Amino acid sequence: MNHSFALKAGRSQKRFTSLTINTSHDRFEIPIFIVRGKKDGPTLTIIGGEHGTEVTAPEIIRRFIEGINPEELSGGVIGIPVANPPAMRTKQHSFPYDKWVWWSELNDLNRAWPGQPDGTPAECITHALFNQVLLKSNAVISIHSTNYTHYVEADLSSRASRKLCLDFGRIALVRYTNAPGRTSFKAPLKYGIPSMLIEYAPLRHVNHNVIDDALIGLENLLVSMEMKCGKIRKIKDQFIVAYAKGLRIERVDAIDDGILVRGKPWGSHMRKGELIGHIYDLYKYRRIQEIKAPIEGILISTGPNPAHQSTFFMHTDSVCRGECVAEVMAFDRHIVNRNGDEWRDKLLATPS
Ligand SMILES: [Zn+2]
């Protein structure tokens, strides 16, 4: 097996290339974008497309690389827009079968880091990318999609990861975890490389509403890492949730069959008792339920649940009696960034 690949570009240059990974029965081609700045400095790696139904990250990475002026950059940026082409090609979360059907992490590429040279297709891909790209980086950003509200996540105990995560600054919900794992944002930490996870809703579609905002966040990271001059532009609110302690999520169920009409966007800061939306029944179309926040927290989804299964099953805004219609997650800390940007309307997202 030949995995040799040189992560090189000339000074002040961009290079659009690909890495070929041979496994025992398959051969995969993974796109790699490289920008080398005018001056020396750290290397930032951004990885997307690890799951086949998460299609916003590739476009964020492409536009970010396109927008970098190498003359203003110190160091290098590496973009891996589509880390898992076989999962994309088969329109599934994972390859060779969809995780949400079998509830197995066996072939989940984002549970296969740092990989093995003679393992499953996912492990062969992660092994090559980990050794040839991620280990040569000074920070790793992993971008995914979710059918819950947008969030970022990083390891609480790593000061550098904490700084990255807060300086990205464009997503209100910030989750802290220090559990070990085989994901692309946890594996680099073992080697002292700071890293973070970014999750944008929804699955299955390119979310054009968030791309411009994501580009501001990635630009913030260049400033944070002193790879570029400029000011960090955060949004007004950041809510810290200590995932390590266990998440506190309270849900509201539908009292009868009906249509869910949302009144608040995902990510909203809800006070206890505040109105989230309504349900109108299917048989007389009368308002039968006011959905109210059971606790103070962040509105992380408005039904149906489990949200991730909409990869595979038809999901609509009609709900059945007893079905979950809203989930609110308690937070531990609210950071208010003075002079921060407004964010709520721009980041409105519900599954489509
Ligand atoms: Zn993912």
Image (cartoon, rainbow, N blue to C red):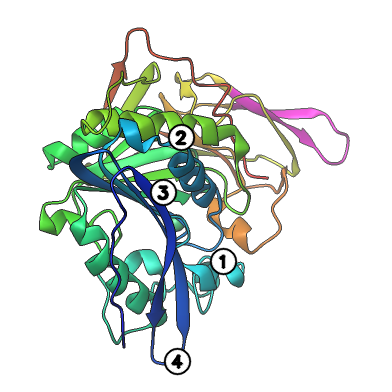
Instruction: Residue at 32%, 14% (x, y): give it.
Output: 336
Instruction: Residue at 28%, 61% (x, y): give it.
Output: 7
Disc 1 target residue: 88
Q: Position of residue 40 (x, y in %)?
A: 18, 41
Q: How far is mark 4 from mark 1, CA to CA?
A: 18 Å
Q: Position of residue 181 (x, y in %)?
A: 24, 61
Badge 4 vs badge 3, beta-carbon distance below 8 Å = no
Label 2 sits on what residue type? Answer: Ala
Looking at the image, tell me whether mark 4 or mark 1 is earlier in sequence order.
Answer: 4
Q: Is residue 286 magenta?
A: yes
Q: How far is mark 1 from mark 3, CA to CA?
A: 15 Å
Badge 2 vs badge 3, beta-carbon distance below 8 Å = yes
Label 4 sits on what residue type? Answer: His
Disc 4 target residue: 25
Q: Residue furthest bottom?
A: 25
Looking at the image, tell me whether mark 4 or mark 3 is earlier in sequence order.
Answer: 4
Badge 1 vs badge 3, beta-carbon distance below 8 Å = no
| Neighbour tally class for label 4: few under 14, some 14-19, many 20 plus, Cα within 10 Å | few
Label 1 sits on what residue type? Answer: Met
Badge 4 vs badge 1, beta-carbon distance below 8 Å = no
The quarter of the picture where the C terminus appears is top right
Disc 2 target residue: 214
| Neighbour tally class for label 1: few under 14, some 14-19, many 20 plus, Cα within 10 Å | many
Magenta-tinted stretch? 276-291
